[in-house]
Amino acid sequence: MLSYQHHYHAGNLADVHKHALLAWMLDYLTQKPKPLSYIETHAGRGLYDLSAPEAMRTGEAAKGILRADQWFAPAHPYARALAALRQDHGPDAYPGSPMIAATLLRAQDRLHLAELHPGEHAALKSALDRKNIHIHHQDGFALAQSLCPPEPRRGLLLIDPSYEIKSDYADLPRILTTLHRKWNVGILVLWYPILTSGAHHPMLDALSAAHPTTLRHEVSFPPVRDGHRMVGSGMFIINPPYGTDAQAAILSGHFARLS
């Protein structure tokens, strides 16, 4: 059984990178009235409390969203999602990617969220009990394979594993290529950590070779504490919506000013 729980890391700088781009892309998709599908393979619990002992113990949110809040104007979709959640759940609430999607998407859109960890799955069901949200207690890669191409065919798939299973690095190029073949119009988004070990390099080499016209965006930041191995965050996006590269460049500017 997987042991990873994101509560210790919620709101860190990798979340800021990932969630800001995700929120912008989802908001862009909703500019057209047609319904869409959102699929997430590793959903987590959806709702986090940054004042909880787990979050306070690591201090990652203090160096993450609590510092980066000022980067986003109130009209930015990430800021809107944060504001909506804080209004409903208090100032220490933080949305995981499923909650961001649920906040920004509409009643006609369909969400499929997979979470294998039993405790996180139960929390996710409690946080997101809505008619158009389908929560699956199963392997997220298997769910994505079974759903693609989804109905509606417009939409976005987020793959956001913990990389606790080291074989994910070797398996993801094949998985992403298969999903793209099944759902060639879908926006396929892979998040990955940038580690001091460089474990992500072979995976990205394989992905870039198979998908040379995609958007690959990476940001770097100081380790949150001595010995911490994550020093950046990456997003590999197949079929990025128009303007995503410009949004990514804005984020790069913010992260470049960190010290």
Image (cartoon, helix red, strand yellow):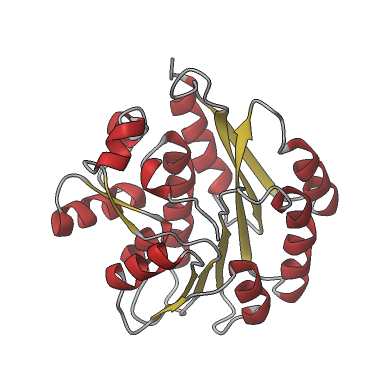
Q: Residue at 49% x, 67% y: name it.
A: 115
Residues 161 and 189: in front is 161
Q: Considering depth in this image, is 99 or 60 the residue closer to the camera? A: 60
The x, y position of residue 101, in whole percent, is 40, 63
Q: Residue furthest top?
A: 259
Quarter of the image with the N terminus in it = bottom right
Looking at the image, residue 103 sits to the left or right of residue 177; the answer is left
Q: How many marks?
A: 0
Residue at image location 74% in from the left, 76% down from the top: 182
* Image spot of residue 158 (x, y percent): 55, 60
The answer to which quarter of the image holds residue 66 is top left
Position of residue 173 in the picture relative to residue 235 (left or right): right
Picture quarter with the C terminus? top left
Looking at the image, residue 59 lies above or below residue 121? above
What is the x, y in percent for residue 123? 33, 65
Residue 229 visible here? yes
Q: Which quadrant of the structure image shows residue 245? A: top right
Q: Say if 194 sits above or below 181 in the image.
A: above
Q: Of all residues shown, which one is farthest toward the front?
A: 1
Q: Quadrant of residue 140?
A: bottom right
Q: Is residue 10 visible?
A: no
The residue at 65%/78% (across/down) is 148
Residue 13 placed where, x, y %? 43, 34
In the image, taking residue 158 as reference, residue 101 lies left or right, namely left
232 over 159 or under it: above or below:
above
In the image, residue 218 above or below residue 226: below
